Amino acid sequence: MIKLYGANASPFVRKTMAVLAIKQLPYEHIPSMPFSGDEELARVSPLQKVPALIDGDLNIADSKVICRYLEDAYPEIPVYPTDPKQRARADWFEEYGGTVLAESAAGLFFHRFMRPRVMKQPVDEETVDKIIHEKLPPMLDYLEGQVPAEGFLFGDLTVADLALASPFVNAGYAQYTIDAAKWPKLSGLVERVKAHGAVAPLLEAEAAAFGG
Ligand SMILES: N[C@@H](CCC(=O)N[C@@H](CS)C(=O)NCC(=O)O)C(=O)O
């Protein structure tokens, strides 16, 4: 059986879990926390980042690598568009979601959630304010011009939608929601991804883990 290593509060692990769910692939989730000195994680993930995956004799890390492998190895239910131009756009949104968006969301999550709750330190309001008022708005403006008012980016839910929405789940744990009056399309897309049958159960499990 496929083994997936990772903490499910990670936007990258969540994206990968959603892909496994869409593809209806059974897997064993092995909870692994980066930064914890987890020896098993170090063995399966040379950069000690999550997620990592084992499928038989294959051991890979990085959500983009994993999602592409799953698409190639288990193509019956696709999670990327097949048209080359759409596929290229999907790859781009996966890159964008997994870099600048994820960094901002991780920043909010770290400063507003991890610091007070786990590290018992005060919230760094200045950094939080900068992310919310300086870093995020140009990204949201850009994405508002890219995403559809209804449905998903390429018809059925794909990795592109997951990659754009997943960081905002983390931002949500830091009491940040996209202002629907300013960015109605993106806000709507994020809510539709969260309500999707492959994603909603993951979020319920996360909420339970966070005591929510
Ligand atoms: N490009 C990687 C990013 C993975 C990543 O940064 N994961 C974070 C958790 S959200 C992590 O493991 N960080 C530990 C570290 O940076 O050492 C992917 O798509 O999987």
Image: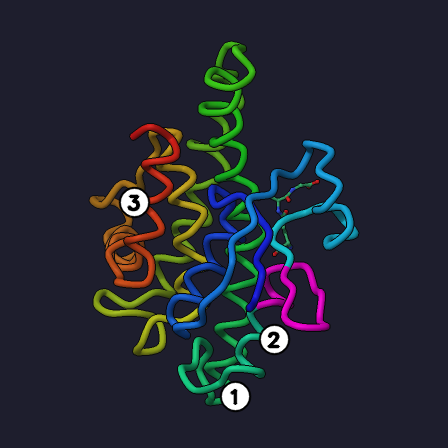
Q: Amino acid at mark 3?
A: Glu
State the CA–CA distance, disc 1 to disc 2. Answer: 18 Å
Q: Amino acid at mark 2?
A: Tyr
For image coordinates 53% across by 43% down, the residue present is 7
Question: Mark 1, mark 2: which one is toward the viewer?
Answer: 2
Q: How is colour applied across the structure in the image?
A: rainbow
Query: Of residues 3 and 190, which is closer to you in this image?
Result: 3
Q: Is residue 63 magenta?
A: yes
Q: Position of residue 28 (x, y in %)?
A: 51, 58
Q: Amino acid at mark 1?
A: Pro
The residue that label 3 is drawn on is: 204
Q: Position of residue 134 (x, y in %)?
A: 48, 34
For image coordinates 41% across by 74% down, the residue present is 23
Q: Position of residue 190 (x, y in %)?
A: 31, 54
Q: Earlier in the sequence, mark 1 or mark 2?
A: 2
For numbered disc 2, what is the local secondary structure?
A: helix
For numbered disc 3, what is the local secondary structure?
A: helix
In this rendering, would 104 be left or right of 69?
Answer: left
Question: Mark 3, mark 1: which one is toward the viewer?
Answer: 3
The residue that label 2 is drawn on is: 69
The residue that label 1 is drawn on is: 84
Mark linked to residue 126:
none
For numbered disc 1, what is the local secondary structure?
A: helix
Q: Is residue 3 magenta?
A: no
Q: Position of residue 98 (x, y in %)?
A: 56, 54
Residue numbers of the magenta segment: 53-66
Q: The C terminus appears in which quarter of the rendering?
A: top left
Query: Of residues 181 and 117, which is closer to you in this image?
Result: 117
124 in relation to 191, above or below? above
Label 1, ligand 1: CB separation under 8 Å: no
